[in-house]
């Protein structure tokens, strides 16, 4: 059942074999034996396509219910009996992963030497189920209801600019003045739209429409443009503390903090919280809690809304 479900989730024998660490031929034999045992065809497969039959769709639904019940029954015992071990595939946001998570992986490896981490860094929205990823860290409000999410942090931002920009264009003192300045625009590689400039004003969120002559879709490039004086920027606060201390950037509008974004660890519903996944989730929460600019407002395990 587990093999059958994983093949359907991955929509590929080859991808499923990789996530299960088994030869592809082993999966093919398992499905053939399962279909012979049930006396029905579960999958229609050619060299290029893979599709469920009507019986396969019904069997999949029942397998998911049964496997979830098995995981729920076994989880308390496995958690106390098993040491965290094995391969764990994790997807990280590019900038946050490079600048905060990866430089601190040595501590995780020393604490859990039997976990083999396979990390992907990037900003595309990865399909965890199809690509066989165990979990991902994501920044922003979550939309995928097929995911279980654990809030592990909160990304805080600062409005700032290089001294050379302020010398040429002046320093905004209000949000109205801010709107008349040039900004470096940071747009989403997923949607192609610029991230909004939003501020907390007397407990409410106020948006300011910014204009600019330069737009980038990478947070490191965004910061570099700001340091060169190409416009105002609103980067993650954890990225710029050193630049502020050295006077390379100047903080602006301290009375109007930008809105923060949640940082969540997500994994597919129906997947058990294995010891290795639980260990990584707990370590990540501790990692973000150690940095005030990334610390969670609250940490709750809940369904992704």
Image: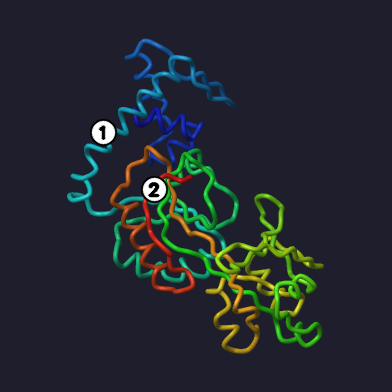
- The image quadrant that residue 75 belongs to is top left
* Image quarter in which the N terminus is found: top left
Residue pointed to by mark 1: 70
Give whichever of discs 1 and 2 has the lower sequence position.
Answer: 1
> Does 1 sit above or below residue 278?
above
Residue nearest the viewer, comparing 175 with 134: 175
Q: Residue at x 43, y 42 (%)?
A: 268
Residue 297 placed where, x, y %? 43, 64
Residue nearest the viewer, comparing 70 with 14: 70
Residue 294 placed where, x, y %? 47, 69
- The image quadrant that residue 48 belongs to is top right
CA separation in Å, label 1 and label 2: 21 Å
Please indicate whether residue 288 sits to the left or right of residue 256 in the image.
Answer: left
Residue nearest the viewer, comparing 299 with 94: 299
> Does 260 sit above or below residue 292?
above
Mark drawn on residue 50: none
Task: State if disc 2 and disc 1 touch (CB < 8 Å).
Answer: no
Residue 92 placed where, x, y %? 50, 57
Q: Residue at x 71, y 86 (%)?
A: 163
Helix, strand or loop status at disc 2? strand
Neighbourhood count class around disc 2 (C-alpha, 10 Å): few under 14, some 14–19, many 20 upward = few
Neighbourhood count class around disc 1 (C-alpha, 10 Å): few under 14, some 14–19, many 20 upward = few
Q: Residue at x 41, y 24 (%)?
A: 60
Helix, strand or loop status at disc 1? helix
Q: Residue at x 29, y 57 (%)?
A: 114
What's the coloring here?
rainbow
Mark drawn on residue 302: 2
């Amino acid at each position: 059942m587990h093999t059958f479900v994983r093949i359907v989730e991955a929509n590929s024998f080859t991808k499923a074999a990789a996530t299960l660490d088994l030869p592809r031929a082993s999966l093919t034999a398992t499905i053939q034996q399962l279909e012979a045992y049930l006396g029905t065809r579960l999958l229609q497969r050619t060299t290029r396509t893979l599709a469920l039959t009507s019986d396969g769709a019904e069997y999949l639904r029942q397998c998911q219910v049964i496997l979830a019940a098995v995981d729920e029954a076994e989880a308390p015992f496995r958690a106390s009996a098993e040491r965290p071990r094995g391969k764990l595939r994790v997807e990280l946001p590019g900038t946050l992963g490079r600048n905060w998570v990866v430089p601190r992986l040595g501590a995780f490896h020393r604490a859990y030497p039997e976990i083999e981490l396979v990390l992907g860094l990037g900003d595309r929205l990865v399909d965890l189920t199809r690509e066989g990823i165990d979990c991902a860290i994501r920044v922003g409000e979550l939309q995928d209801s097929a995911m279980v999410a654990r809030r592990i942090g909160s990304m805080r931002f600062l409005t700032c600019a290089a001294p050379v920009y302020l010398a040429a264009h002046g320093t905004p003192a209000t949000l109205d003045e801010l709107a008349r300045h040039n900004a470096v625009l940071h747009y989403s590689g997923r949607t192609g739209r610029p991230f909004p400039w939003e501020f907390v004003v007397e407990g409410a969120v106020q948006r300011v429409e910014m204009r600019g002559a330069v737009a980038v879709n990478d947070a490191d490039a965004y910061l570099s443009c700001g340091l060169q004086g190409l416009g105002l920027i609103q980067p993650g606060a954890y990225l710029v503390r050193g630049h502020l201390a050295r006077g390379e950037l100047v903080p602006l509008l301290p009375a109007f903090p930008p809105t923060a974004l949640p940082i969540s660890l997500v994994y597919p519903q129906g997947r058990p919280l294995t010891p290795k996944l639980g260990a990584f989730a707990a370590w990540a929460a501790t990692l973000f809690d150690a940095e005030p600019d990334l610390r969670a407002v609250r940490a709750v395990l809940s369904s992704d809304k």
